[in-house]
């Protein structure tokens, strides 16, 4: 299942009501998950052997590219292109004016799988920040401790702070009273990763993290609260 949402189309002016679609909440598989799927129950393949074959496959293609050779199989096509203009028939390739481009294209055996994808429309206002993991650099712990004044790394989805509203930010909410503190220094601000400095004023006790932000081109505040309580010692 692939979720998608609609948003304003700023590229056309003839119809003010038309919209564009964008996939959201897309699951991104990793190499580890790929190998696990290949070597799962019933398979005669071993994880280490499978990883070695995958590495060898792409390393060999990369070596073809280094030799100026294209490549094609049932799944992928690797070809060359050259950008830039040449002054006349005597002109030669100049790295300052030209560039060699490697084009990698998936074959129909892969892209045709998109015909089997089930699509589901979701309301963008229903999508909220999702915190999956909190890493505290000061204590080198995951989902356990907060070290005031040190660095915290938050990973998840829909985390990016767009700065549309003043209320946007990462908040530390006390579980013993009504106090909360906002992180004033955010270094990495991406949809799946936030890196920030923990407020030095956090008192000892239990705290929860809440990300408050807006969706792209929206002025509606949304929030996502991490369910795990974190401890300041």
Image: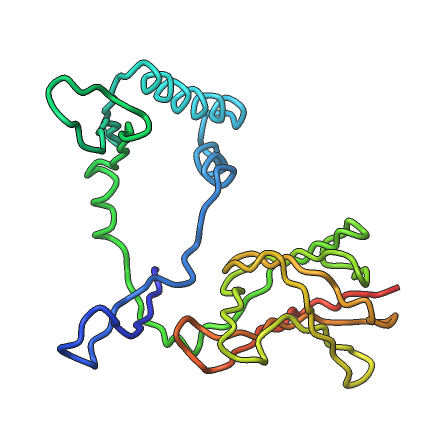
The location of residue 10, given as percent across then percent down, is: 26, 72
Q: Does 166 sit above or below residue 27?
A: below
* Depth check, front residue: 174 or 66: 66
The x, y position of residue 110, in whole percent, is 26, 40
**Residue, far left:** 89
Which residue is depicted at the point 45% across and 81% down?
Answer: 219
The answer to which image quadrant residue 182 occupies is bottom right
Identify which residue is drawn at 67% across, 60% down.
196
- Residue drawn 70% across and 57% down? 152
Relative horizontal placement of residue 137, taking residue 113 as reference (left or right): right
Q: Foreground: 160 or 124? A: 160
Q: Residue furthest bottom?
A: 178
Outermost residue, top side: 67
Q: Position of residue 131 (x, y in %)?
A: 59, 64
Quarter of the image for residue 133 reads bottom right
Q: Position of residue 140 (x, y in %)?
A: 77, 49
Q: Nearer the viewer, residue 100 or 61?
A: 100
Picture quarter with the C terminus: bottom right
Above or below, comparing residue 72 to residue 27 in the picture: above
Q: What residue sits 52% from the left and 57% below the top?
A: 192
Whether residue 129 is situated above or below residue 39 in the rendered picture: below
Q: How many marks?
A: 0
The structure's colour scheme is rainbow
Q: Give the quadrant of the N terminus.
A: bottom left
């Amino acid at each position: 299942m692939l979720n998608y949402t609609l948003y304003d189309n700023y590229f056309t002016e003839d119809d003010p009501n038309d919209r564009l679609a964008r996939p959201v909440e897309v699951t991104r598989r990793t190499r580890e998950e790929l190998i696990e799927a290949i070597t799962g129950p019933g398979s005669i393949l071993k994880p280490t052997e499978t990883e070695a074959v995958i590495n060898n496959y792409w390393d060999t293609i990369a070596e073809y590219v280094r030799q100026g050779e294209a490549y094609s199989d049932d799944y992928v096509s690797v070809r060359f292109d050259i950008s830039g203009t040449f002054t006349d028939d005597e002109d030669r390739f100049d790295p300052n004016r030209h560039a060699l481009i490697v084009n990698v294209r998936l074959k129909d055996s892969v892209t045709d799988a998109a015909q089997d994808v089930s699509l589901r429309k979701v309301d963008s206002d229903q999508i909220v920040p999702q915190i999956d993991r909190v890493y505290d650099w000061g204590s080198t712990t995951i989902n356990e401790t907060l070290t005031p004044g040190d660095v915290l790394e938050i990973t998840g989805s829909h985390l990016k702070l767009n700065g549309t509203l003043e209320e946007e930010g990462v908040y530390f909410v006390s579980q013993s009273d009504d106090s909360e503190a906002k992180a004033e220094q955010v270094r990495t601000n991406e949809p799946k990763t936030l890196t920030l400095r923990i407020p030095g004023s956090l008192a000892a006790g239990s705290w929860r993290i809440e990300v408050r932000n807006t969706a792209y081109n929206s002025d509606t505040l949304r929030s996502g609260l991490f369910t795990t309580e974190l401890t300041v010692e």
